[in-house]
Image: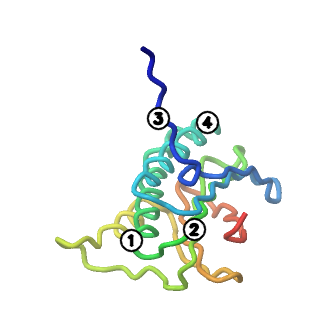
């Protein structure tokens, strides 16, 4: 008897798009309903992409930042989520930008780390050369972080719905 691998429901698989933004390569994934497995999926996608872009040295920090951002979306902003990863031209050094778009207008507020959490933005601040939040015109926000040294990367402005 042969068994077939369990197929993940299509609802939980991200929709992937490739954008060229002013000569800045970017990959974008969309989850209509992020779940507890979304952070793991996002980490794997970011690691594979940064490896393809020869930015291996940034992968661990970028995966950690993305994991924290995805966790914040799942806890505080239920609804669709979009993850964008872009990179600066290789001639300008190794850096990448990650951005999570969600439907909540509430900006993340740093908390004092303790038993009930509060470590996410502390971790992001420690690993990113810069980070911030920008409202998006269609509602919601973009939370972005730049990983690596040098001038800022382009962080794409995208609509939440693909």
Residue lying farthest to the left in this orientation:
115
Distance from the alpha carbon under mark 1 to that under mark 2: 13 Å
Mark 4 or 3, closer to the camera: 3
Quarter assignment of residue 158: bottom right
The quadrant where residue 21 appears: bottom right
Q: Nearer the viewer, mark 2 or mark 4?
A: 2
In this rendering, would 71 be left or right of 45?
left
Decide which of tag 2 and tag 4 comes sooner along the chain. 4
On residue 80, the disc is 2
Residue at (70% x, 65% y) in the render: 156
Distance from disc 1 to disc 3, alpha carbons, whole Å, reads 27 Å
Residue labelled with disc 3: 6
In-image side of 52 versus 18 (left or right): left
Q: Where, by quadrant of the figure, is residue 137 drawn? A: bottom right
> What residue is disc 4 on?
54
Q: Say the numbered circle drawn on residue 5.
A: none
Separation of marks 4 and 1 at Cα, in angstroms: 32 Å
Q: Disc 3, disc 2: CB below 8 Å?
A: no
* Quadrant assignment for the N terminus: top left
Instruction: Tell me if residue 150 can be seen.
Output: yes
């Amino acid at each position: 008897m042969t068994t077939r691998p369990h197929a993940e429901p299509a609802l939980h698989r991200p929709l992937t798009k490739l954008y060229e933004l002013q000569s800045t390569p970017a990959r974008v994934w969309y989850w209509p309903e992020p779940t507890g497995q979304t952070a793991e999926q996002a980490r794997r996608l970011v690691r594979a992409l940064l490896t393809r872009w020869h930015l291996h040295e940034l992968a661990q920090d970028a995966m950690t930042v993305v994991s924290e951002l995805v966790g914040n979306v799942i806890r505080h902003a239920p609804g669709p989520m979009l993850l964008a990863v872009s990179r600066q031209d290789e001639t300008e050094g190794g850096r990448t930008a990650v951005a999570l778009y969600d439907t909540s207008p509430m900006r993340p507020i740093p908390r004092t780390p303790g038993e009930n959490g509060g470590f996410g933005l502390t971790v992001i601040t420690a690993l990113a050369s810069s980070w911030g939040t920008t409202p998006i015109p269609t509602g919601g926000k973009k939370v972005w972080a730049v990983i690596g040294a040098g001038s800022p990367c382009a962080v794409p402005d995208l609509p939440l719905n693909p």
